Every structure is written in structure tokens, then in C-alpha cells.
Amino acid sequence: MRNKGSKKLTIAKGKQKPIRLSLSDKRSVRTQFGALPFRIRDGSVEILLITSRGTGRWIIPKGWPMDGETPAGAAATEAFEEAGVEGKLFHQVLGFYAYDKGFAGERLPCVVAVFPLKVKKQLKSFPEKQERRRKWVSRKKAAQLVGEPELRQIIKDFDPKALR
């Protein structure tokens, strides 16, 4: 869809089909949607990180596509379930990162589209509270704590002023 000099990307609702890496490889790349929860405190951007359930490493909330939900909407749902936050959702993709997810004893390659979420409300009780820790940190610290290089770069480059 094009509007006088600007380009817009429309992502259709529906199930995400795996992208095949090769015909001989039964492992398929899967798409996930992640939220980058942020807030502004004393003029500085802070990012909310959570721990993964398995290894306890620092990550952002993310999950699988959801029937009838937009990619950004699925990311917001994951932010609620995994981090207990709600807020203003932006539908623009900040970037993509790849990681291998441990699944049924195997490593499943995933690509995550990251959507910004300006946190307005942090809940005391949320579905995965007992399974995760959460921590507000500066952009610089968040980039140091996450393990995926592309996610590190997305966090370093994040500028809330550029959001539409």
C-alpha cells in the first residue's frame, strides 16, 4: 500500500507457515513476534527484560503467531503473559533477530519480529509471574544482557522519538 511518497507494510492476519531452509532439512525456520517494552524515566529510555523459563537468560517477551491477531497484537499478548505489562502498542517493526529455541529436545530456528510497547501499566500479578523475573534497565545495560547480536543492535538503535 502506498500513500503519497510513503510506503506502508501491511501484514495479514492468519497462521504463519514455516519457511524451509532446504529440502533435506526437516528443521523449519519459524516466525515469532516479540515486544520491546519500554518507558521513559527522568528523560532516559528504560527497557524491561525478563528471564527465559529454561535457562534464566535475559530476553524480551515473545511468542508464536495467534489466530485472529496481528503480529504486534500477539507481541502485546506475550508482554502481558510473560512480563505483566500493558501499554501503547506500535505496529512498526523495529527489526528482526534469530535464535534457536529448545523444543521437544531439539533446536528449532526462529526469527523474531520486534514491536515496541510503551508500558503504561505494570501488573503485580500475571500468568507467568512464578516462572520469570523482570528487570528495568537502561538501553545500554539491556544490550549487554541479551545474548542475541541482532537483538542487541535493535536495542542499541531504539529511539522512541522515531515511533509513529
Image (cartoon, grey):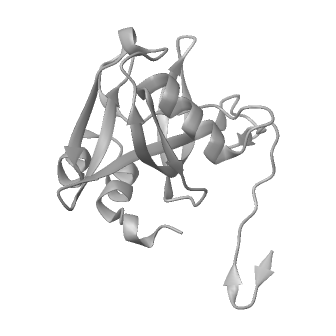
Q: Quadrant of residue 55?
A: top left
Relative to residue 89, is residue 61 depicted above or below?
A: above
Q: Up-down: is 109 above or below 128? A: below
| Left or right relative to 68: residue 112 | left
Left or right of residue 151, residue 135 in this image: left
Give the left or right position of residue 84, taking residue 31 as reference.
Answer: left
**Nearer to us in this view, 80 or 96:** 80
Q: Residue at x 18, y 47 (%)?
A: 141
Asked if residue 32 shows in the view, the reply is no
Q: Position of residue 49 (x, y in %)?
A: 32, 36
Position of 10 with respect to 162 (left or right) is right
Q: Position of residue 160 (x, y in %)?
A: 38, 64
The answer, for residue 117, to whether it is visible in the render is yes
Query: Residue at point 54% right, 44% down?
Result: 112
Q: How many marks?
A: 0
Quadrant where the N terminus sits is bottom right
Q: Quadrant of the C terminus?
A: bottom right
Depth check: 57 or 39 in front? 39
Q: Residue furthest bottom?
A: 5
Instruction: Judge whether 55 appears above or below 22 on screen.
Output: above
Query: Which residue is at 46% across, 24% downward?
Result: 82
Residue 40: quadrant of the picture: bottom left
